[in-house]
Amino acid sequence: MDNAQGERTKKPDRSRLFLAYTAIAFAISWAIEIPLALKRQGLLSADVPFSIHYLAAFGPGIAGIVLTWREKGLPGLKELLLRLFKWRVNAVWWIVAVSPLLLFLLIAFTEGFMRGTPPDFRILNHFDFLPHMGVAVVLVWLATYGFGEEIGWRGYLLPRLQRDRSAWSASVILWLIWATWHAPSFFYLQTVSGVGTLLGFLIGVLAGSIFLTWLYNSSGGSILLVAVWHGLFDYVTACTECKSGLVAAIGSTLVMVWAVVIVVIFKRPNLSPKERQML
């Protein structure tokens, strides 16, 4: 009876932590993005630089760090740090982690060969709202949409969701939160312009959630690898000239196809060749 009562008291606590995590992540990110959306829509006259858009990516990570400290204190932060810098994994998972950049190089050299001209890598230096930074701009993407997001999504939330759920169910719940988190950006980045693009966005985020669950579980819980993949994928698909290019189209398609393969081959309980990672 005591054990059963203990279990009943733990689950509501975890539910409150999930709600607290979502509230903190959204509050930080939306506090940055909503003024940008209001300015873009002509509802705010204040001088808000659109470059602060990139800071919104830190919301999930900050929420993960705060609640890890709240839940487990210093030992929890140390454990989070170990997963954040977990680099000793099978080489195949490192290849997966850097695969967005490899895909870009493959397509760039193929296009250059077909046209008889060398590939122009300077397009990777030009991003919306950012000054010219040269190749150093990749560090912005790794820091923001890589580590800024993944310390939260896969570092904090996923292993806790997987504690009582299959990897599939955890990925779907995370997908719903992740997709909703993007909502304010639709009103100033013009990411979604109709029902068709909204549906495509939702399918793409679901595929990304499954893919990153697969990579996280397969790598034994490495936040580093999912952050590198996420940051590089956004980097090579979001430059000003890349958004409507082959890399974005082929990369998104491959992720969707592989997400289906993951579900079919590795099945829903773990979505990977290894056991799901739980906290």
Image: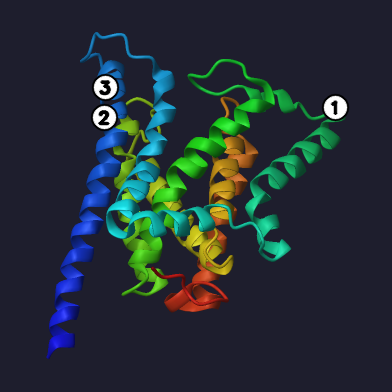
Q: Amino acid at mark 1?
A: Thr
Looking at the rendered structure, the secondary structure element under dot 2 is: helix
Q: Which residue is mark 1?
A: 117
Q: Position of residue 112 (x, y in %)?
A: 81, 33
Q: Please tell me whether residue 63 is drawn above or below residue 186 in the rendered image.
A: below
Residue appearing at x 57%, y 76% in the figure: 273
Mark nearest the camera among 2 and 1 is 2
State which quadrant residue 257 falls in.
bottom right
The foreground one among 277 and 215 is 277
Residue appearing at x 52%, y 62% in the figure: 216
Q: Please tell me whether residue 128 is drawn above or below residue 102 in the rendered image.
A: above
Looking at the rendered structure, the secondary structure element under dot 1 is: loop
Q: CA distance from mark 3 to mark 2?
A: 7 Å
Q: CA distance from mark 2 to mark 1?
A: 45 Å
Q: Earlier in the sequence, mark 2 or mark 1?
A: 2
Q: Amino acid at mark 3?
A: Pro
Q: Which mark is residue 35?
A: 3
Tell me whether the residue at label 3 lies in contact with that at label 2, contact meaning CB atoms closer than 8 angstroms.
yes
Residue appearing at x 60%, y 42% in the figure: 232
Q: Amino acid at mark 2?
A: Ala
